[in-house]
C-alpha cells in the first residue's frame, strides 16, 4: 500500500507546482482507515489514488445453537477520477476502479444442532466452513465533496458510492464424508446462501475525513 501511494506521489511531481494537490486521511467502510493522494488535471477534473483497510471484525459466537468462529476483513486500493460540475463548489461526481480484498470466513463446529437443507444435524466433532467474498476488481460510482482546486491548507472531504460487483459463496464440510447429509443437501444449502447475498451485485461505500492541500 505504501509503495503504491509513493508511486502516485512521484507521478504528481509532473504537475505544475502552481496547481494545488492534497493528501488525505479518513475513516469509512468497507475498509476502516483511508489514506489517499489527489491532484488536479484541470479546474473541473482531478484524479486520486486511495487505499483503505484495517477492518478485522470477529464473527465468533453461537448462532441458532451452533458454536461458530470467523472473521470479516476488508481492504482495497483504488484509482478515481473526480468531475466538479460546478467550479465554485466542492461537489463532485466520481468514477473509478478498485482492487479489493473483502471477505468473511465462518466455521460452524464442535457443538449444537445445525439445519442443512431443512435437515437437523448434530455438529459434534463436525465442521461446516463458509467463505463469502466480494469481487476482487470492481468499478466504482459515487458522489463526493472536497478535493476542489481551492485555497491551500486543511480541508474536509466526504464520499459515498457503490462498488459494482458480485459476491461468491463457497463451503466445505465434514458432514458428507461422515454421511450425516448428502452432497445434494450441501449444494442446496449453498444455493440458498448464493441466492441471498450472492445476488446483491454491489457493495455500498462511504468515507469522511480531513485533507491537507499544498
Image: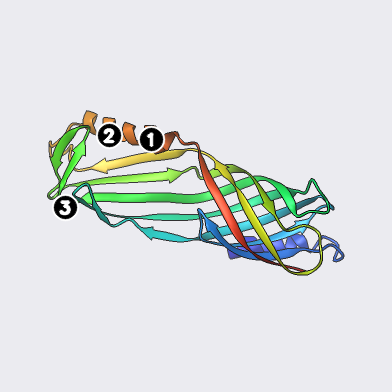
Relative to 171, say whether 17 is above or below.
below
Dot 3 crowding, Cα within 10 Å, few <14, some 14–19, many 20+: some
Callout 2: helix, strand or loop? helix
Nearer to us of marks 3 and 1 is 1
Please state which of the two labelled residues, at mark 2 or mark 1, is closer to the viewer: 1
Disc 1 marks which residue? 196
Name the residue that disc number 2 marks: 189
In the drawing, does residue 162 fall left or right of residue 146? left
Q: CA distance from mark 2 to mark 1?
A: 11 Å
Q: Earlier in the sequence, mark 3 or mark 1?
A: 3
Q: Is residue 180 left or right of residue 195?
A: left
**x, y percentage for residue 58?**
35, 59
Mark 2 vs 1, N-terminal side: 2
Q: How many marks do you count on the picture?
A: 3
Q: Tell me: residue 43, above or below residue 155.
A: above
Where does residue 19 sit, x and y in percent of width and height? 84, 62
Q: Please, what secondary structure does the residue beneath circle 3 have?
A: loop
Q: Which mark is residue 1?
A: none
The span from disc 2 to disc 3 (Cα, nearest Å) is 19 Å
Residue ID at (64%, 56%): 158
Q: Residues within 10 Å of mark 1 (few under 14, many from 20)?
A: few
Residue closest to the eye, 111 or 9: 111
Q: Which is more N-terminal, label 3 or label 2?
A: 3
Residue 10 at what x, y percent from top left? 73, 64
Q: Residue at x 73, y 64 (%)?
A: 22
What residue is disc 3 on? 110
Amino acid at each position: 500500500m505504501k509503495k503504491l501511494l509513493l508511486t502516485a506521489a512521484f507521478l504528481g511531481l509532473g504537475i505544475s507546482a502552481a496547481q494545488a494537490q492534497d493528501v488525505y486521511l479518513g475513516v469509512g467502510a468497507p475498509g476502516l482507515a483511508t489514506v489517499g493522494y489527489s491532484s488536479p488535471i484541470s479546474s473541473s477534473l482531478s484524479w486520486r489514488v486511495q487505499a483503505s483497510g484495517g477492518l478485522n471484525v470477529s464473527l465468533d459466537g453461537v448462532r441458532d445453537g451452533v458454536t461458530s468462529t470467523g472473521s470479516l476483513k476488508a481492504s482495497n486500493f483504488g484509482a478515481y477520477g473526480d468531475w466538479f460540475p460546478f467550479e465554485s463548489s466542492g461537489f463532485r461526481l466520481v468514477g473509478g476502479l478498485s482492487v479489493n480484498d473483502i471477505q468473511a470466513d465462518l466455521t460452524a463446529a464442535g457443538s449444537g444442532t445445525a439445519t442443512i437443507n431443512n435437515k437437523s444435524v448434530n455438529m459434534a466433532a463436525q465442521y461446516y466452513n463458509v467463505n463469502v467474498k466480494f469481487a476482487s476488481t470492481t468499478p466504482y460510482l459515487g458522489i463526493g465533496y472536497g478535493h476542489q482546486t481551492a485555497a491551500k491548507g486543511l480541508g474536509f472531504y466526504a464520499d459515498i458510492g457503490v462498488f459494482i460487483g458480485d459476491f461468491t459463496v463457497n463451503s466445505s464440510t465434514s458432514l458428507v464424508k461422515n454421511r450425516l447429509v448428502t452432497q445434494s443437501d450441501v449444494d442446496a444449502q449453498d444455493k440458498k446462501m448464493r441466492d441471498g447475498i450472492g445476488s446483491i451485485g454491489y457493495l455500498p461505500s462511504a468515507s469522511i475525513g480531513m485533507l491537507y492541500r499544498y
